[in-house]
Amino acid sequence: MRVCVLFLACALLTCLGKTPPGDTLSGRLVQPEGGPPALETADHKMVLLDGDEATRGVINDHRLKGVQMEAKGHFTAPGRFLIDPIHTRAIQVRKDGHLKLVTYWCDVCSIRTYTPGPCWCCQRETTLDLRDPDEK
């Protein structure tokens, strides 16, 4: 009976598009030349980062090199962390003592995106725009 209840709860969460809470990893973003990005934790351990294509764009953005970051996701192996998909806004950076969402802005078209690259409209490079999580 307990197995059936657990199975039904997992199925319900899946249908609602929600997953059980994962882990939060904090540290300094390290982007080694020719290597995958990683977070250096407070105890100086390196944890390799990965995620969907848009998330990989953010963690490889040279403008974020060395920032203090928090990432939500889960460990796939010791020393390997998979960040939740970009639409969950699983990456935040610390600036001036506050957590900020990582966004990118086009001044010409007033278009906001959540991964670096050219504007969808004018094709100019978007600028990094860290925002308070409560801002719309």
Image (cartoon, rainbow, N blue to C red):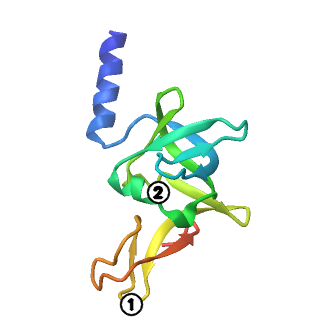
SS type, badge 2: loop
Of the pair 87 and 25, the residue shown nearer to us: 25
Q: Is residue 90 left or right of residue 99?
A: left
Residue farthest front in this picture = 34
Q: Is residue 60 above or below residue 35?
A: below
Which residue is located at x 48 percent, y 55 percent? 59
Q: Earlier in the sequence, mark 2 or mark 1?
A: 2
In the rendered image, which quarter is residue 5 located in? top left
Image height of 103 relative to 7, above or below: below
Disc 2 marks which amino acid? Asn
How many numbered circles does the render carry? Answer: 2
Please give the residue where the numbered disc 2 appears in the rendered image: 60
Sort mark 1 into few (<14), some (14-19) or many (20+) by Cα contacts within 10 Å.
few
Is residue 19 shown left or right of residue 4?
right
The one of 111 and 18 positioned closer to us in this rendering: 111
Residue 133 seen in the current view: no
Residue at numbered disc 1: 108
Image coords of residue 80 (percent x, y): 49, 34
The three-letter code of the residue at mark 1 reads: Val
Position of 127 compared to 100: left or right?
A: left
Separation (CA) of disc 2 from disc 1:
24 Å
The image quadrant that residue 125 belongs to is bottom left
Q: Position of residue 62 (x, y in %)?
A: 52, 64
Q: Is residue 9 visible?
A: yes
Q: Residue at x 51, y 44 (%)?
A: 72
5 to 35, vertically: above or below: above
